[in-house]
Image: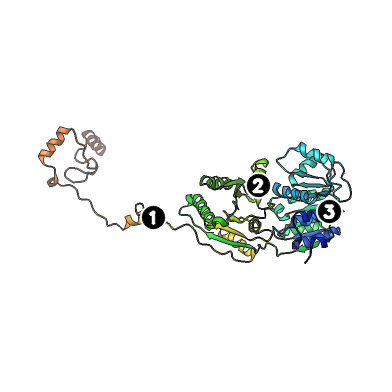
Amino acid sequence: MTKFTDLKLDPKVLKAIADAGYETPTPIQAGAIPPALEGKDVLGIAQTGTGKTASFTLPMITLLGRGRARARMPRSLVLAPTRELAAQVAENFDAYTKYHKLTKALLIGGVSFKEQEALIDRGVDVLIATPGRLLDHFERGKLLLTGVQIMVVDEADRMLDMGFIPDIERIFSLTPFTRQTLFFSATMAPEIERITNTFLSAPARVEVARAATTNKNITQGVVMFKASRKDREGSEKRKLLRALIDKEGDACKNAIIFCNRKTDVDITAKSLKKYGYDAAAIHGDLDQSQRMKTLDGFRDGTLRLLVASDVAARGLDIPAVSHVFNFDVPSHAEDYVHRIGRTGRAGRSGTAMMICVPRDEKNLGDIERLVKEEIPRLDNPMPAKAPSKSRKSSDEATEAKADEPKTESKPKTTEAAEPAEEKSSHRDRGPRKSSRGRSQRDDGNKVIGLGDHLPSFIAKSFEERLAS
């Protein structure tokens, strides 16, 4: 079995790895590190949670061990699709460079430009950035990319989903042609393959798992759910989510709950807190300091449930996540792989559950075709409600009314009139309004037109018109 000591890494890097408690590299690390150390371009394809970050951080630190950075000209560049993923990469560099004097800068949104510019002005060996913030600094004239020796693109397929590919292509054009490129992705969409063919030179392809496969350590399941009424779907889905969490009991130590929309993230988090669950929301519209505070609470165990949008589907390196709940079926099948990849990491087992409403069955089918397996169907943990006897649904009421026998109302006759004594008593109490309709006369005959009470002036004018 390959060990880190067999990979020709810098002794100081090996010492930092040992301090972190790692001895054996993962398959993607064992496959990507040797060609990276040789200066070759690398195309790494592996599912999330397999240790891709160390696959490029470890050889980069070894290669950058010699040399010195110049002001505004970073020696290496790591591009990440989200702030959280960029922050995770920065943490990895901090851990593995503890015995080196390499410098780094993290360029992400939500942080002051001045603080970031101060770091760049001093010169950094490693620049970790999201594409948008990197180009912002470049366009302000605060950054030059002509000194980049090693460029890393992490989670390239996520870059594609988020619309960053034009930015990536522009950044590639700003770096030297002689750079070394390390390109990592969980899936290989046609657009991703086009970019690798354009910007990578004879890359060493390292593929440790079939594209878009799910971790076998994860127990998966889906509950097929149909709301009683369309306007109650949201509340009933949230009730089902609580039932799934309760059913797992103590086995659900912590969990990430994914929603497709940011508004649903907020609503679901507030609903869980209302019912006494320890939950908080994280999505792209929150302030960066709030996002980091929430993530820190989830990492250190003070927060049990993290309700997230897909901004958190990548880059959360929290090995001990026991459960993932997909409150919504993801719109893109690849996102399912990345979402459930937040559990079952580092050899641990995990559980992933999903709620599927009828309109999402097509997306569910796309997921099952992508992962080439059927996701087991789970029983609904909520007991079925018996129909209420006191209230019928509108359809049942309509059907019942249609089945009732029709009865004709008989007009009241003079024989059924009230006795004279009762009539006099009514008169004593005051005038009594007739309950008979306007279309009914005392003799029971229907009124046609104006009846016998045709006014004389109408009859006269009618006769004059006939005479003329």
For the residues labelled 2 and 3, the Cα–Cα distance comes to 30 Å
Tag 3 residue: 12
Residue at x 71% of width, y 42% of height:
109
- Nearest to N terminus: mark 1 or mark 2: 2
Query: Residue 197 appears at what percent x and percent y?
Result: 79, 59
Q: Nearer the viewer, residue 231 or 96?
A: 96
Query: Residue 298 appears at what percent x and percent y?
Result: 63, 48
Q: Amino acid at mark 3?
A: Lys
Residue at x 67% of width, y 63% of height:
213
How crowded pointer 3 is (Cα within 10 Å; few <14, some 14-19, many 20+) is rated as some
- Say which quadrant the N terminus sits in: bottom right
Query: Residue 61 appears at what percent x and percent y?
Result: 82, 52
Tag 1 residue: 395
How crowded pointer 2 is (Cα within 10 Å; few <14, some 14-19, many 20+) is rated as many
Residue at x 48% of width, y 49% of height:
231
Tag 2 residue: 295
